[in-house]
Amino acid sequence: MGRPVVNKGNIKPSLKYAKVSQYKELLTLARTVSARMVINIADFPTPIPPLTDLDTAADSLRDATIYQGLRRNKGSKFDTQQAKKAAKNTLQVLTQLLQYVINTALIAFPDDAPGFNVVIAESGFSLKNIRRIKHISQSRYVRQDNSNAHPSTKMRLQWKRGVGLIKGAPIAGYIIRASNAFSHLTTAGYQDILFSPAFLSTDPTGLAASQHYFFNIKIDNNSPVGITILGSTALTMGTLITQLNLHFAAAALQCTAVALTVGANNYIRIQSNSSGITSKILIYDSLAMFYLWRSLNGFNAFAAPVNGTDVLIPLTSTDIATVTKTNWTYNPLMGPTPNLTGKIIPFNALGEGNPIDFTLKY
């Protein structure tokens, strides 16, 4: 990864050799920039300010120097004042356009100095005429805090305020943009009870109204718990699922019974309310009389339990945080996480500033 292009000390880009007193150079530069940005409109689709502003300013400078002269060797005092005014306005528009060009180049090539330079050249501005833009490494501006207040499970960044910020508006905050962030994708454990043929919620369960039916279930890593249901409360498959959830809630069990489709279903799923590698469901089978599941119409078999999972999913060029202070703490959800690399991007009402690379080492 290359080093980002950053204005040292947050210096506003400016034209090094173009001065208000240099009418000829200003007029030439204005015409060149206007022509080149029109030719390369694909790279500069929305100039700020519009190129018409630059053309108008350049025309005013041209007209003002008809009497004053490009070398300021003729004309009245009034002519001189008008020429200076037109030159100042032209320089102001050029400086604003230069800021737009630099921001455009940074967005296209934040870590590629040669590419950045090509975009600048396509605009008609010459790098020789721009105050020097230097590379700044992470080490001077970003550091990782490993103090006791932030244990090893957390990684904290600190940086200097305003580095690389776009001038013209107060700092609004900082975007933390990851190049290789990882997100934990967790799933819940479950076990399915299979039926054949498929059933509707209104289908009878086949349970005797006066009989109690039981089964044992183990949730996550807890001890098995017995559940007993009266047949008269679960005469249809729909009411059976309702009663299962009522009994789970009454016993403070962290699981849920569901039939996953609106129409015909060929299984009832008992799913843990937790997720991750400790999320599990185990329904104990039994051949005893009045065992709930084998007493149901259409019962077929128990599917193998499916344990919960926890996997790391890479996130590429993803904004993972926005902060207003000059520090940010990354707190992995669980377990060791790969090192995190990315950029700290200051922003304000005018847009994003220059990015600063960072690496968080776990």
Image (tube, grey):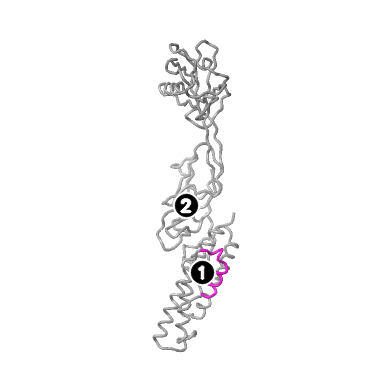
Quarter where residue 336 is shown: top right
- Point out the stretch of residues depicted in magenta: 30-45
Side of 195 where 57 appears, left or right = left
Q: Nearer the viewer, residue 195 or 324?
A: 195
62 within the magenta span: no
Q: Secondary structure at mark 1?
A: loop
Mark 1 nearby-residue class (10 Å; few <14, some 14–19, many ≥20): some
Q: Nearer the viewer, residue 335 or 247?
A: 247
Q: CA distance from mark 2 to mark 1?
A: 27 Å
Residue position for label 2 = 175
Q: Secondary structure at mark 2?
A: strand
35 within the magenta span: yes
Q: Residue at x 43, y 78 (%)?
A: 86
Q: Nearer the viewer, residue 337 or 253?
A: 253
Quarter where residue 118 is shown: bottom right
Quarter where residue 235 is shown: top left
Name the kind of residue labelled 1 in the image.
Arg
Q: Residue at x 44, y 16 (%)?
A: 229
Residue position for label 1 = 131
Mark 2 nearby-residue class (10 Å; few <14, some 14–19, many ≥20): many
Circles 2, 1 touching at the beta carbon (< 8 Å): no
Side of 149 where 116 appears, left or right = right
Name the kind of residue labelled 2 in the image.
Ile
Say which mark, if any, is on residue 196. Answer: none
